[in-house]
Image (cartoon, rainbow, N blue to C red):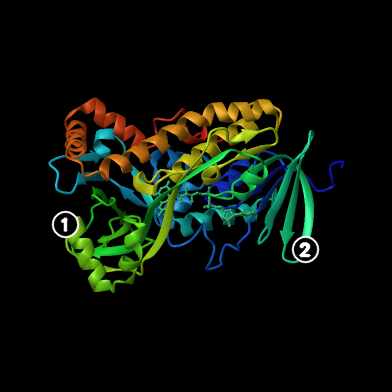
Amino acid sequence: MTPSSRHYDIVIAGGGLCGASLACALSKGGKRVLVVESVALDSDVQPAYDERTVALTYSSRNVFSALGMWGEIEQVGAQPIHDIHVSSRGGFGQTHLSCHDAGQEALGYVIPVRNIGRVLWEALSQSEAIEIQCPASVVNARVEQAYCQIDIVHGSEAGRVTAELLVVADGGRSRLAQILGYAVSTKPYEQSAILSIVRTDQPHHGRAYERFLEDGPIALLPHRINRKSRGPDADACHFAMVWTTRNADVRQRLSLNDEAFVDLLQSAFGDRAGSFADASPRKSYPLSRIRVDCPAMKRSVLLGNAAHTVHPVAGQGFNLGLRDVACLAYLISESGLVLGSTEMAREYVRFRRRDAWAVESFTHTLIQAFSNSMAPVSWARNAFLLAIEHLLPAKRMLLKRTMGLNAMPQKLTSGIPIQ
Ligand SMILES: Cc1cc2nc3c(=O)[nH]c(=O)nc-3n(C[C@H](O)[C@H](O)[C@H](O)COP(=O)(O)OP(=O)(O)OC[C@H]3O[C@@H](n4cnc5c(N)ncnc54)[C@H](O)[C@@H]3O)c2cc1C
């Protein structure tokens, strides 16, 4: 078959956080781009833009600044994280990371994903360079020598387009990655994350908490309820809670009424953040680790969760995906490599493999080491927290990782726009 009249430079399958961010990064580069997204943005079942919040690192903020979107994201509600307190229940070790140690105004920002989605999709809908098909799904893809052939279903209509490059951004457990023959390794954690917005009787002052328990960590991220307020929030007592829970306990925890859930949280977390007063309806997400050693081939690239899904313990998944975006946007727009070529695929793998491996290993090790109750392991993790607290070079290393500044810098992650 020869390339159809519906031929694109780039087709992005999946308009979630990573796919939509890449489309925005490419919107001024003169390329013909099509974004295909299965679920309407305003649908209650849109999986990518639900009621979750994410912690964005400083380097992710740079990406959105370079795309000219940070001002708007901040305006719809970004709560700066000024410091993070890390502790282990029943242990002597704890550490405290502060933005002052890093010489920055914030270590990161907590933002509802729905708000990020709204800003990204508004920009996409105003861009003349980006074509959108939504709701529509990429149902099949085949790589030919000169192009990638892509089958799309839109309601009851089926169509076919071709592209120089197919970007697979359809999330974890990617069907398209399987269809294209990528070697994907998936390992369920036998854990789920229970999410809720909880309120305490004390202002959070921009402090986040990570508390490790034997059966999984509890993260509390400072949350801004008053979305318009950019200054001090009068009601700054809310946290976005992520409680990693063994699958065997999830149903029981979800069935608790508000009062019983708040009591359980209080006894598990302690009173470091104050007394928990109430909790919004709970929702759970099963957790898996997904890794693809070679996330690009001729004419196709895996982006974001399709390439790597990590445990949310350190809030790194989307941040890692945004670094994929920064790298791919550079390779497409400025590297001079032929779009969709084997050389471009090789460079993408070379740039991205190490960062993805480092984040996966870091988050996986955290989960393994901090959920082990054996005495030597418990002693070692407390010693680790103490060492971080007292050894400045170790603390600086952790600060860099927390802020996303340890990966190989790209133009976008340094806040510099792509031409
Ligand atoms: C509980 C929890 C907390 C988290 N906290 C953080 C955090 O604090 N910080 C952080 O950085 N990350 C965090 N993450 C991770 C982050 O949410 C993900 O890394 C990020 O959402 C991945 O984005 P994505 O675009 O790759 O995939 P997704 O968000 O899954 O988007 C995939 C999109 O593709 C669409 N799609 C699927 N199949 C097709 C198809 N065939 N054709 C067209 N479209 C298709 C879907 O509808 C969806 O919109 C967290 C994750 C969880 C579960």
Total label count? 2
Task: Indicate which disc, 2 or 1, sits on the residue closer to the N terminus.
Answer: 2
Q: Which quarter of the rendering shows the N terminus?
A: top right
Quarter occupied by residue 180? top right
Residue 350 in sight in this render = yes
- Quarter of the image where the C terminus is located: top right
Label 2 element class: strand
Residue at x 17% of width, y 63% of height: 275
- 320 horizontally vs 275: left or right: right
**Amino acid at the residue labelled 2:** Glu
Is residue 132 visible in this depiction of the protein? Answer: no
Q: Nearer the viewer, residue 331 or 299?
A: 299
Cα–Cα gap, marks 2 and 1: 55 Å
Residue 80: horizontal and vertical position, in percent? 33, 49
Above/below status of 74 relative to 369: below
Asked if the residues shown at circle 2 and circle 1 are in contact, with their CB atoms under 8 angstroms apart, the answer is no
Residue occupying image coordinates x 46% and y 47%: 70
What label sits on residue 157 in the rendered view?
2
- What kind of residue is marked 1? Gly
Q: Is mark 1 on a helix, strand or loop?
A: loop
| Residue 295 horizontal/vertical position (percent) | 58, 36
Q: Nearer the viewer, residue 236 or 315?
A: 315
The circle drawn on residue 270 is: 1
